[in-house]
Amino acid sequence: MADKERPPATREQAHARMDRFIALGIVAQHHMAQRLGLNVTDLTCLGFVLEAEGAGESVSAGDLAQRANLTTGAITGVINRLERAGYARRENDPNDRRRVYVVSDASAAARLFEAYGGNYRRMADLFADYSPSEIAVLSDWLTRATAVLGVSLNEAREAD
């Protein structure tokens, strides 16, 4: 598939479109979290757990706190709420009794996919309109932009 001709955009226009995308994403996350009986932080953490499990990794409570940029005390509350809502459970590490892993409930991914399924399908259709080289650029940009946002989040938290 050859790269398609795309409408021109300045960096300022792209930045404004990114701001709009992020703002709409935040509103959508709040709505989805509410729909799933969670808050946004808990939903985000559940996403991290499912992402790790999808990659064949286990995620400890400490790892989850680091990924979410939360304190270990705050992550305890997140895990408690995920357990009460039936999305995850704690599992003790057999080799280190101080370590606890967060494991998703067998139905968690299906419950999220039910809520997000339409969005996933529409995004898949959108990606299908891009060539492999364009997808590589998008993926690179998203990876690098995520790192930039992480730095910004750390700076904001340190300023508090």
Image (cartoon, rainbow, N blue to C red):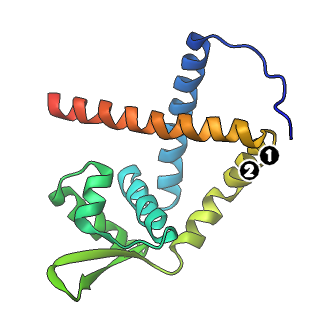
Picture layout, residue 15 above or below residue 143: above
Picture layout, residue 22 above or below residue 43: above
Name the side, left or right, on which 124 lies relative to 101. right
Locate residue 84, reporting x and y percent. Answer: 34, 74
Q: Residues within 10 Å of mark 2 (few under 14, many from 20)?
A: few
Is disc 2 in contact with disc 1, using a CB cutoff of under 8 Å? yes
Residue displayed at 45% across by 79% down: 105
Name the side, left or right, on which 101 lies relative to 73. right
Residue displayed at 84% across by 23% down: 5
Q: Is residue 151 visible?
A: yes
Between circles 2 and 1, the one closer to the viewer is: 1
> Residues under labels 2 and 1: Cα distance?
6 Å
Q: In the picture, which quadrant includes the C terminus? A: top left
Which residue is labeled 1 in the image? 128
Q: Amino acid at mark 2?
A: Ala
Circle 1: element type: loop
Circle 2: element type: helix
Residue 92 or 35: which is nearer the viewer? 92
Q: Amino acid at mark 1?
A: Ala
Q: In the picture, which quadrant includes the N terminus? A: top right
